[in-house]
Image (cartoon, rainbow, N blue to C red):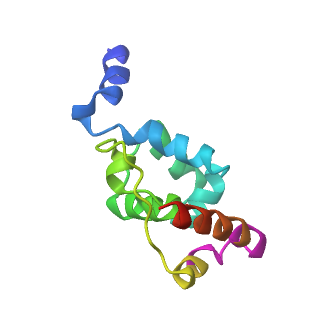
Amino acid sequence: MIKNVKLAKRNPDTGKLYIPMMRDLREDHDLTQEVVAKYLGISQHTYSEYERGKVELPIKHLMKLAKLYHVSTDYILGLSKKKIMSRIPDGEMLNDFSLFGLSVFTKYRALYRKYAEAA
């Protein structure tokens, strides 16, 4: 029975393709679960539960993750292989990252500009 659960998480029909994608995106951006959880306004434990598929990812958090990583929600959900970068005004990004301090904001602002130029 446990094998069926693991297979279900990989099955595109279950809508659980976002589970490995969340971890991959977080690691690709060199972020910890704690930092992403703080961005979402939740505990690190709750975020860990999302990544392990123990708790369903709410739509509001899916949207915030897409904004954080500058990808489409379809990309996170595994419905599209295209990474579509979001066009987010710098001021809006400043509001989101002000929680983390200037050094983190500076790092991600540089990444944002790099992605914005490439798009």
In the picture as drawn, the residue positioned furthest to the left comes out as 13
Q: In this view, does 95 lie to the left or right of 12?
A: right
Q: In this view, does 66 lie to the left or right of 7?
A: right
Whether 100 is among the magenta residues is: yes
Q: Which residue lies furthest to the right in this view?
A: 103
Residue at horizontal 57 percent and vertical 66 percent from the top: 39
Please tell me how many numbered marks the rendered image carries.
0
* Residue sitting at x 62%, y 51%: 29
Q: Is residue 93 left or right of residue 17?
A: right
Q: Is residue 115 above or below residue 98?
A: above
- The majority secondary structure of the magenta stretch comes to helix
Q: In the depicted view, which residue is nearer to us: 93 or 33?
A: 93
Q: Where is residue 27 in the image (x, y as percent from the top left)?
A: 62, 44
- Horizontally, residue 76 falls left or right of residue 40, namely left
Is residue 89 visible in this depiction of the protein? yes
Q: Position of residue 1 (x, y in %)?
A: 32, 14
Residue at 46% of width from left, 59% of height from top?
65
User: Which span is picked out in magenta?
Assistant: 96-105
Residue 61: percent from the left, percent from the top?
A: 41, 61
